[in-house]
Amino acid sequence: MKSATEYITFKTRKHREYINITDSVAKVVAGSGIAEGMVLVSAMHITAGVFVNDAESGLLADIDEWLEGLAPYRDDYRHHRTGETNGDAHLKNLLVHHQVILPITKGRLDLGPWQQVYYAEFDGQRPKRLVIKAMGE
Amino acid sequence: MKSATEYITFKTRKHREYINITDSVAKVVAGSGIAEGMVLVSAMHITAGVFVNDAESGLLADIDEWLEGLAPYRDDYRHHRTGETNGDAHLKNLLVHHQVILPITKGRLDLGPWQQVYYAEFDGQRPKRLVIKAMGE
Amino acid sequence: MKSATEYITFKTRKHREYINITDSVAKVVAGSGIAEGMVLVSAMHITAGVFVNDAESGLLADIDEWLEGLAPYRDDYRHHRTGETNGDAHLKNLLVHHQVILPITKGRLDLGPWQQVYYAEFDGQRPKRLVIKAMGE
């Protein structure tokens, strides 16, 4: 069995931001020498997510608006009694999830034609980590 | 380490459809000769999902109605400026997710008594691919 | 390749309950002798979920309220024609998902500083199973 692990730190300029990390994931896969396996891509924070979708700017704006609709900023989350103001970011994280696991086939990231991997920052402007871990043979 | 990979292409008759693929997944697991491991079941499109739930037709209709409520068809998604009309299908995909990973134990798909694996088509009537990838030993 | 599998049965006192299972997962990882790999944590029922978030009681109450808002109890789910009354629990399960997969690095569960693993019971007061399965080397 082979494995490869890499950490990426993001510090987004905006509070919420969607970053295409497909190339970073493909690079870890290529460097791992794994022909058949899987690669886990996982946010290491509870106010950021990872998802697979289309690299289309209109759609990303739709997704952002939709997430704000379903998991809106609110002053009165109980979580804010701790001094935090990011209750909505925790809920957005639950909605899109913090991780994906992708197939590696014949040495390559085995994605469909339009599938791109996104890091979704919901409470940015500070360092946040992501882990990419491939395993296989 | 052993692995097995299979692709299935769906072309649903309806625009949205929920297809029980548990037997297909179990077949890949059985054919792989893997005793202990995991199997990834992942849509290769960004307008289809995979989930685990109950094989009960009333519930599947409830799920469909609920998804349409939370991620409705709308004319005015920004994504539609590209000529597409399937913005809602992208959002439904984010909601149910495009993949599951299931345990393989003692050579069998290790599901609970009511767990069934579903392919959820949100923009059908054209060929769409799914990948099933098992790995273990 | 090494693997380790453990089942945990929950019987919650309340109908809905959120249980921090991080220590149980870490224990399976430690006992497996795996240095590099992944661990799958998956509910074996379709009315319970697993998620990663913050161990903060206010936030957990926010999450519970939010889930009830997006996937509310209703008398008139079609699923209830079968005699069941837990349609909302199925939808809550879809929303938070029934599983997570976590990295194992240098023999340890490789979580971020605030990441805790939760079992989310949406239809409790009866025995429900969870599987923890680690694999790697």
Image (cartoon, coloured by chain):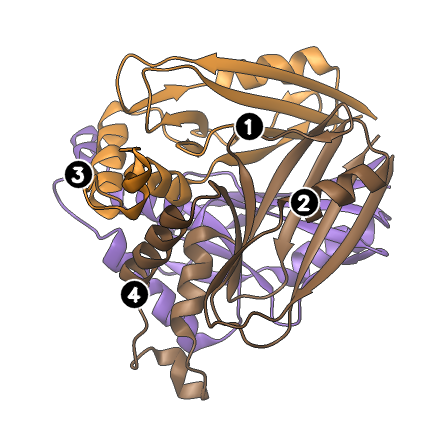
Chain colours: A purple, B brown, C orange
Name the amino acid type tagged 4: Glu
Residue B27 falls in image quadrant:
top right
Helix, strand or loop under label 1: loop
- Picture residue at 65% right of the left edge, 24% below the top: C133
Helix, strand or loop under label 3: loop
User: Is A64 placed left or right of B48 in the picture?
Assistant: left
Residue position for label 2: B23
Name the amino acid type tagged 1: Gly
Place of residue B34 in the rendered image (x, y in percent of width and height, measured from the top left): 82, 33
Say whether marks 3 and 4 touch (CB < 8 Å).
no
**Structural distance between the alpha carbons of marks 3 and 2:** 44 Å
Do the dots labelled 2 and 1 sit on one chain? yes
Mark seen at residue B112: 1
**Structural distance between the alpha carbons of marks 2 and 4:** 38 Å
Q: Quadrant of the C terminus of chain B?
A: top right
Is residue B51 visible in the rendered image? The answer is: yes
Residue position for label 3: A77
Place of residue C18 in the rendered image (x, y in percent of width and height, measured from the top left): 34, 23
Residue position for label 4: A65
Q: Dot 4: within a 10 Å radius of its alpha carbon, few (fewer than 14), some, or many (20 or more) residues?
A: some
Q: Which chain is mark 3 on?
A: A
Q: Which chain is mark 2 on?
A: B
Q: Is residue B99 above or below residue A44?
A: below
